[in-house]
Amino acid sequence: MFFNWCLNNLIGLRKTLKNSLICLLFVGYIDPGNGFNFLNMFNGLLIILAGLSGVLGIFLKKTYKFLKPHGKLIFFAVLLISGGIIFKGVFMHKPAMQTNNKVIILGIDALSPDIIESMIQQGKLPNFFRLKQQGSFKRLATTNPVQSPVAWAAFATGKNPGKNGLFDFIVRDPETYQLNLSLSKNKNGLPQRVLKTKCFWQFAGEDKIPAVILSCPDTFPPDKIYGRMLSGMGVPDILGTQGTFTFYTSGPLEENVGGKVFQIQKSAVVMMQLIGPRVAGLDGNAQNVQVPFKLEIKDNHTAVADYQNKRIELKCGQWSDWQEVSFSLGLFKKAQGIFKFYLVSIEPELKLYISPIDFDPRKPLFPISYPGNYSQELFQQIGFYHTRGMPADTWALNEGRISEDAFLRQTEEIFNQKKAMLGFELKRFKTGILFCYFESVDTVQHMFWRYSDPEYLLSPNDNKYKSVIEDYYKKMDDLLAGVLEKISRNDTVIVVSDHGFTAFKTAVHINSWLKESGYLSFHQDQFGEQGEYWKDIDWSKTKAYAIGFGGIYINQQGREAKGIVSPGLETEQLKQEIAGKLILWREGADKKKIINKVYTQAEIFWGEYAKESPDLYIGFNPGYRASWQTAIGGAPKKLLEANLKKWSGDHLVDPVYVPGVIFSNKKITVENPTIYSIAPTVLKILGYDLEKINKYDFDGKPLF
C-alpha cells in the first residue's frame, strides 16, 4: 500500500520534472545549416519553479502524514528491500570475465596501401616494416560507400550499414525531403547516438573488460562504457555545426561556403563579433548570441584583440594561443568555448580569421566524454585541445582564408594532441582495449594531393609541399615506434586504416545528369542553383533524385511524400534502366569511363535498416567524384566540372580502388580481410569463443 502510494506520487513528480526540464533544456537541433537553438524562458522558468515547489510541498506533506502511524511497517519494509538489494549484488551479479590480454589499436584514417608499400620498399617506414615482419600486413577491404563515418561505423560494430544504420554523410527524410547530417541526431533538443547497434567495446564492457576509446568517429554523444571514452567525429562546434569559421576582411567579398564572412572598414580600431549559439525568445525567433571584441591595429604586423577583460596580441601569419569565451544563453545558462585567432594580414587589406569555436573540455555544453569529467582530466594532462570531431579547418584552406603553412601548423598541433592523449593512456593501460584515432593523414591528403600528383589540373609550382603527404606517413611510423617500445611480448598491436586514397580531378553533378536524362524535373525547366538544395523541383514529374556522395533514390509512392513511381516491378525496372545508362556515361573525345559500377541497395546493404539507404549507389572510377552540389541536392547546368579547389584528393570512389590496410604483430590467417572483421577479432583476442562471437551477428570473422 505504502509503496503503491509512494510510486504514484513519485511518477507524478517525475512527469512534472521531466516536462519542465524539457522546456528548460530544449536546444533545437543540429543540421547542416541551423545549428543549435536555445530557448530563453525566464518567465516560464518562474512559473515552472513555482509549480514544482507546490507539487513537492504536497508530496512531502502526504508522505509525512502516511509515515507517522506506520513506523514499524516501514522499518521492516526498508529492511526487506535492503536485503534484496544485497542478495542481488552478491549472488546475482555477473562476474567479470577473466582476461589479462591487451589490445592496442591505432586507427589511422586513409593510409593508402600503394603509398605504404612504396615507402616500405624504399626503407622510409622502418616500424611498419618491423610490424609486418613480426606479424602481418594486408590490404583491408573497406565499406561501400567509402566514407569515413561509414567505414569507422563498420570497424566499431563489425556490421554493414544496413545493420548499424549509418550509410552516408547526408541523409534525407522521405516524408519531407529534408536533409540532415548523419553524424548529428537529436531528441527533445539533446544529441542522440547515431549508431543503431552495439560496438565491440560495449560487448566487452558487459563482461567487465575495460576499454579506453579516444576520438573514434561516430561516438557523439559518448557511450557509457566500462572504461573511458572521448567522443570523435560528430562532435559539433559551439554553433552546432561541424565547423563554421568566422572571417573579417576589408577587401572585396567572394563566394563563400564554409564559414561566416564579413566585410569591414579598416581603421585604427575595428569592432567585430565572436558568434555564438542561437537563442530563441518566446516568440520563436532565434538570433546568434554575440560577444563584441575590439581590434586595435598597432603597426603593419601587429594588432591587439580586446574582449571580456582579455587582451591578446596578434602577429600576422601566426596562430594565437587558445582563447576562452563565454556566451550567455539566458538565465543561469552559459556556453563555454575555446578558439584561436589567426591574423592573416593588415596591409594592404585587414584580414582576420577566427577558428570554429569548440566546446571547452573543462565544461562542454553537452557531454563529449564518459565519464563526464574525463574531458577535463585530459585537459589537466595536456592542456586545451580541439574537441570538435573534425578539427582541421579544411574549408578555410579550400577557400583561401588561411594559407597552407597555417593549415599545416594547425594539423601538427592536432596530431600532437592525439599523440599526448595516447601517451597518457599507455602509461596506465593494464588490460582490455586501448584505441586512438588519428585523422591527420586523411586531411593532408585531401588538401595536398595536388602537390604529389604531376598530372593534377592545378599544376602547383611550390615544391616545398611535395613531401607533405610522405612526411605524415613518417610521423605515423614514429608514432608506431613509441607504441612498440611500451608493449610486452603478449600484447596485441593492430594498425588499421579505413580506406585508401586517390585523386579528385572531376566533379560529377548527378542530379544534372538525372535532369538531362528525364528522371528529375524542375518547374519551368530550370536547373537548381548551385548553392541551394531542392530548388524548384517538380516532384510530380520526378522519378529519381540524388543526395549524398553517390546515392540515388527512386521517388517512390508510399515512401516519399510526393512519390510517383510504384513500388515493386516499376521501381526495379527504373533502377536497372538508370544503372544501365550511367555505366555508359563517358567524358571527352577519348571517351573516358566515369563510373565503374552502379550498385543496387540489395548488393551492398542488408539488415534491419537497409530500407533507409539509397536505392542505387555509384562506384566512380578514380579521378571522379560526386560534387559538393550533388550532396545537398543541387543541379548546376554542367554535367561535369573540373575540380579546381585545393581539396584535391579523395576516396569517394568504387571501393575496389581504395582499400584500407591492416598491420598486426600477430599472424593474420584470413586471406582477404575486411573492415567488418576487426570487431570479432578484438573479442577473440580478449578470450571470447567463436560460439559467443557468432551470437553477435557480425559481418566478418576473426582474423587470427
Image (cartoon, rainbow, N blue to C red):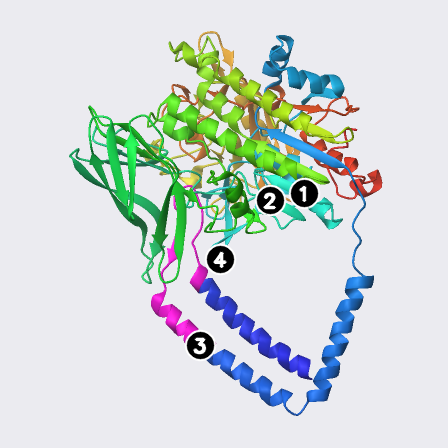
Q: Position of residue 107 (x, y in %)?
A: 61, 30
The amino acid type of the residue labelled 3 equals Gly
Question: What's the CA distance linking mark 2 and mark 3?
Answer: 38 Å
Which residue is the site of mark 1?
Answer: 211
Q: Is residue 622 left or right of residue 132?
A: left
Q: Position of residue 177 (x, y in %)?
A: 46, 44
The amino acid type of the residue labelled 4 equals Asn
Magenta stretch holds residue 50: yes
Which residue is at 46% across, 77% downward? 53
Q: Are marks 2 and 1 in contact (CB under 8 Å)?
A: yes
| Rendered-image quadrant of the C terminus | top right
Sequence-first tag of 1 and 3: 3
Q: Secondary structure at mark 4?
A: loop
Which residue is the site of mark 3?
Answer: 51
Q: Are marks 3 and 4 in contact (CB under 8 Å)?
A: no
Q: Position of residue 32 (x, y in %)?
A: 42, 41
Q: Residues within 10 Å of mark 1 (few under 14, many from 20)?
A: many
Magenta stretch holds residue 389: no
Which residue is at 68% across, 26% downward? 484
Which residue is at 51% across, 27% downward? 440
Question: What's the CA distance linking mark 4 and mark 2?
Answer: 24 Å
Residue at the far bottom in the pictured view: 69
Sequence-first tag of 3 and 4: 3
Q: Are marks 2 and 3 in contact (CB under 8 Å)?
A: no
Give, as a single range, the part of the protein colored magenta. 24-52
The amino acid type of the residue labelled 2 equals Met
Sequence-first tag of 2 and 3: 3
The amino acid type of the residue labelled 1 equals Ala
Which residue is the site of mark 4?
Answer: 188
